[in-house]
Image (cartoon, rainbow, N blue to C red):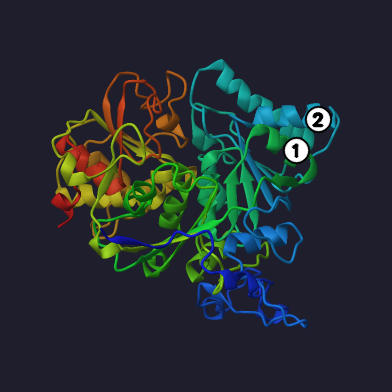
Amino acid sequence: MASSVISSSPFLCKSAQQKDLGFPKPSQISVHRCQKRAISRKIVSVMAPQRSSSATGSVKTGMTMTEKILAKAAEKSQVVPGDNIWVNVDVLMTHDVCGPGAFGIFKREFGEKAKVWDPEKIVVIPDHYIFTADKRANRNVDIMREHCREQNIKYFYDITDLGDFRANPDYKGVCHVALAQEGHCRPGEVLLGTDSHTCTAGAFGQFATGIGNTDAGFVLGTGKILLKVVPPTMRFILDGEMPSYLQAKDLILQVSIIGEISVAGATYKTMEFSGTTIESLTMEERMTLCNMVVEAGGKNGVIPPDATTFNYVENRTSVPFEPVYSDGNASFIADYRFDVSKLEPVVAKPHSPDNRALARECKDVKIDRVYIGSCTGGKTEDFMAAAKLFHAAGKQVKVPTFLVPATQKVWMDVYALPVPGAGGKTCAQIFKEAGCDTPTSPSCGACLGGPADTYARLNEPQVCVSTTNRNFPGRMGHKEGQIYLASPYTAAASALTGHVTDPREFLQ
């Protein structure tokens, strides 16, 4: 194995409780105001500077990133795993599926004429059941529109013309990708959403997790949430040079950290990722990594922010933010180490994300279709990767290959950005040459099934290789469908052969 568990004890040592746990002094805190002033030189380590002991001489335990973020949000000098705390929320996101219910609970509990706590800290993104003739699905968007107008919600990314998404300049697409693209993800903040994959935003060094409609209704009225317990933190240290045929999807499935600890191994725990491999990842790849921590049961995933993070965020928002880092003496309930250079492309076989197998071990599995899209695998770099493999292969797909860009921006990138090493060709041009389906309107699409007329929905018991995040029975439609979760590289390679295929067949 390329991994090793360093510690699985609840606390690394008894003396950890005696070490200092407070925040850095003001002079040690770098507040970013989105000005391009050599930020990368200010913070160069994933460990925060240690604060000296208090005047009494007592030494307290250091805090992890998540504990620091929650302590600040709870207006406390320190918190420890197991604490029950009230937290101030920086951003609340909801979408067309859960939004009507959340606002309904808000009105029931706070009154029909009640106003939300802050209309500029609520983000409403229609994305799940959009391009459908289903009247109830369409009505959900109408209800959200009514609530947002009534409450003067600033960030409502509306869509009214379902016939042409481009006629809706405010419409974005998949909420977790749109949140990042529109500057709502910022280091050190608390972001909650009525969707389990809200944990994606942890890639930006913030506490991000999914909540239910009842909790969201309360947050709408108060801007606060009661955390059952402060989660303990598991640390995953990934080092080594990333092989050219691997992507973050391979890491989260295998290192998987899900394949390693199972779909329940991180239940109500924080999964913190660090190491040289993580530092080399782009923001979109980091988002993929954090996106699927919930598939391991994680409360949240988090990555220490660095120059890559700051450059991305600064280009999208002028809101100041304050990054935090785990202390050197912070307590982790377990450390997992991985040598990424030794890993191979993997898939998750039906019907669970932790049903891990090497892609090459599944070469005899005949497939019926390939799906590239979702918050996990529908970002610009995901399509770039698929196009790169198609171009390198110079062949046509043998099974229907569906392409669902996550957002309007991703869709435009697919048609406008040249693929590196492809002679100036765009993803769209390469996809057409390879015989793929035309990239469709941006949305969650068939990732979670949806109404029967949802594009690329599994309406028959077919076998699909997908870049999405879940493969439970019925997840993409038909309850007898079989879904193999894979990276964009593996999905593209499989499309070319009609079988689950290791991408190294075309990339080496």
Where is residue 351 shown, x and y percent of the image?
33, 31
Say which amino acid is labelled 2: Glu
Q: How crowded is mark 1: few (under 14 residues within 10 Å), some or many (20 or more)?
A: many
The kind of residue on which mark 1 rests is: Phe
Q: List the residue tagged with mark 2.
A: 109
Decide if residue 100 is on the left or right side of residue 56. Answer: left
Which quadrant holds residue 23?
bottom right
Q: Is 409 drawn above or below residue 38 in the view shown?
A: above
Task: Name which residue lies at 41% across and 29% down.
Answer: 446
Number of other residues with Cα within 10 Å of mark 2, as a class: few under 14, some 14 to 19, many 20 or more: some
Which quarter of the picture shows residue 99? top right
Which residue occupies the foreground of this view, 99 or 347?
Answer: 347
Q: Do the residues labelled 1 and 2 touch (CB within 8 Å)?
A: yes
Q: Position of residue 168 (x, y in %)?
A: 56, 36
Q: Which of 266 and 39 is in front in this view?
A: 266
Q: What element carries label 1?
A: helix
Task: Say which residue label 1 marks.
Answer: 218
